[in-house]
Image: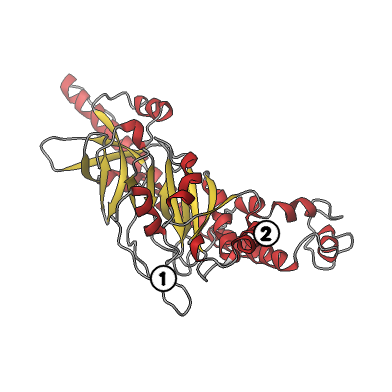
Amino acid sequence: MNLNLTSLGWNPNLQSHLESYADPSLIPARVVRQNRDQYILNTGDRERVAQLPGSFHQRISSEIDYPTVGDWVVLQCDPNHDIQLILDVLPRKSVFTRQAAGRTSAHQLVAANFDFLFLVSGLDGDLNPRRIQRYLTLAWNSGAEPVVLLNKADLCHDLEAALQEVKTVANEATILAVSAKNPQSLIPLQPYLQQGKTVALLGSSGVGKSTLINALLGESRLATQANRASDSRGKHTTTWREILSIPTGACLIDLPGMRELQLTGEEAGISKTFADIEAIARDCRFRNCRHQGEPGCAVESAIEAGLIDHDRYLQYSKIKDESRAAAKRRGALQPANAKKKRALEEKEQRFKEISKSMKRTRKAHRKGGHIDGF
């Protein structure tokens, strides 16, 4: 995939950051795929293989500082080597993270620098509004605009009812019903797929992301698998993240299927996903109202009046509690992370002091003098 930088999404803001390095030998590149500790980059004229120098690992403070698919990086090219070096990651305009598997508060990078996030769900029997609600909570937090894509509309017996069901949880997000097998249904996607724009596709296994991407590519490039007839669920087809270019000039980031997303504790997106509930909560008598029998609770009054669906409120409470728990776990690790950061800063300072002392010593020897303490 050879594209010019503009088609890849390069813009004046990124150019100004690159120029701040004041080194004309450095060039920009975009991460189009990651293979373990190596990165496949596109520099606008060709693809290159790159890796991180040892100094990069020493100066970062968390996992989210590493490059990921979609990132723009500063590259130091050496024509005498097949593998180039990534010196830095340029500022991101959006990033999608999830909590890493297991009992940890670590964040796992998924993708970066996309303009829109297509949240794909299937209409063939595995439609789950609560899952869409969870995806939206994280999607709003990414910095990009989420769009709910209801795929396989040709297999839905009551499309209007499905749309109404999803509207109850989607709030401000746009909802589009499409079918990868019907090109006409994909026309509403064109405003999101303009040249220089990047769209990431996220959804559970079996929702038809690969089939949808093949339709947008105009060729059967990605492997697809049939869903299980018993529950309409599919198997993982995409096993890595990569950027694909489509004929409109846009870039797609194909993400592996995710059946469940754990929250990270930084869900500003909760306020977007449940804006209706939080707006009513501001009318509660007490600012710290827990909506559990407190006098003057506007939320409970709204539930009784039918203004808030009770199941929707229960889902809001569940996601809110999960987010608080994730934030608490993350906060518990802050002292350790801060200690590690201080140790690195102290080590760097010691190296600077030693370097300065050695320079003074060499200078004194050249002049035939001496320095106290040496």
Q: Is residue 286 visible?
A: yes
In the structure shown, which secondary structural element does the residue marked by tag 2 occupy? Answer: helix
Q: Is residue 345 left or right of residue 177?
A: left
Q: Nearer the viewer, residue 264 or 305?
A: 305
- The residue that appears at 40% across and 43% down in the rendered structure is 345
Picture quadrant where residue 148 is located:
bottom right
Q: Say what amino acid the circle numbered 2 marks.
A: Thr
In this view, which residue lies farthest toward the left?
Answer: 80
Q: Which mark is residue 234?
A: 1
- The residue that appears at 50% across and 68% down in the rendered structure is 124
Depicted 29 relative to depicted 231: above or below? above
Q: Position of residue 236 (x, y in %)?
A: 37, 67
- Quadrant in which the C terminus is drawn: top left
Q: Which mark is residue 168?
A: 2
Q: Say what amino acid the circle numbered 1 marks.
A: Gly
Sooner in the amino-acid sequence: mark 2 or mark 1: 2
Disc 1 packing (10 Å; few <14; some 14–19; many ≥20): some
- The residue that appears at 44% across and 62% down in the rendered structure is 100
Q: Nearer the viewer, residue 102 or 57?
A: 102
Disc 2 packing (10 Å; few <14; some 14–19; many ≥20): few
Q: Is residue 325 left or right of residue 336?
A: right
Q: Which mark is residue 329?
A: none
Depicted 332 relative to depicted 3: above or below? below
